[in-house]
Amino acid sequence: MKSVGIENIIFDLGNTLVYFDFCYFYDRIAHLEKKLNPSKFRKFINDKKLGIKLTKGTLDHKTFFRILKKKFDLKIGYDDFKYFYSDVFWINNQMKNFLDKISRIKKYKLFLLSNTDALHMNFIDKNFPFVGVLKNRVLSYKVGMIKPQKVIFRYTLKKYNLNPEKTLIIDDIKENILSASSLGIKTILYKNHRSFIKKFSALAKNAEANNK
Ligand SMILES: [Mg+2]
């Protein structure tokens, strides 16, 4: 079978370009609030699907804060809360280098497709400026859809007029990969950098050989 060359690369954000762990948020709040149990705090947020609502853009952070403040009798202020909520990321240096390189060679059109919210995205743009090279973005909280819903992948293809066969998605979550793949998009499940580079080189090489 002839494989078609890749023209577009769509990057995931969390645990692909930057790592994250929400434990930093739960633990920091619990540390400041003497009687707060971080597991209960976390469970409440999950049970009420507050994280998903933030990501879909149907809940704003002030309301999120008010709900938690009331439920857990929080003493901290909104500014500290916002900072703790946002400061849960750290850089994936290898992916940063990959993105720097691939944007320099100008061979591919590059995109960002992320399940995220306004606070997290602002924090990322401020603290991880390398992500700024991805100017074409589909952000869940802005479009009201989340991965792995097929509709967000379809929306992305349509918005930027992308041929799925010529488009590669890099994402660390299997469900997202399966969903994108079912629409004919090429995919790499990002698990570790070494295996990613191997798969990416094979895809790029394969396409080149077929184009000759
Ligand atoms: Mg991810």
Image (tube, rainbow, N blue to C red):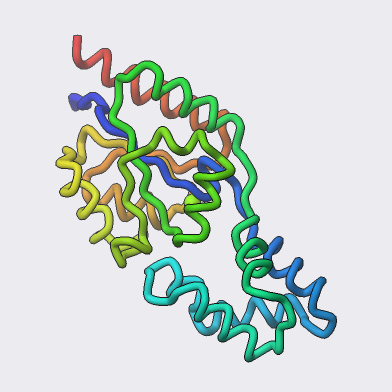
Kindly indicate the quadrant of the structure image that contains residue 126: top right
Work out whether residue 24 or residue 163 is closer to the camera in this orientation and state it.
24
Where's residue 14, x and y in %?
Answer: 52, 50
Residue at (75, 68) in percent of width and height: 27
Q: Is residue 171 left or right of residue 82?
A: left
Where's residue 109, x and y in %?
Answer: 28, 30
Residue at (77, 74) in percent of width and height: 30
Looking at the image, residue 196 lies above or below residue 141: above
Looking at the image, residue 61 lies above or below residue 201: below
Q: Quadrant of the C terminus?
A: top left
Where's residue 80, x and y in %?
Answer: 68, 67
Looking at the image, residue 57 lies above or below residue 101: below
Where's residue 113, x and y in %?
Answer: 36, 49
Residue at (51, 43) in percent of width and height: 16
Work out whether residue 11 or residue 190 is closer to the camera in this orientation and state it.
11
Kindly indicate the quadrant of the structure image that contains residue 167: top left
Kindly indicate the quadrant of the structure image that contains residue 71: bottom right
Q: Is residue 191 left or right of residue 28?
A: left
Residue at (71, 83) in percent of width and height: 74
Query: Exactly how many numbered labels are in the figure?
Result: 0
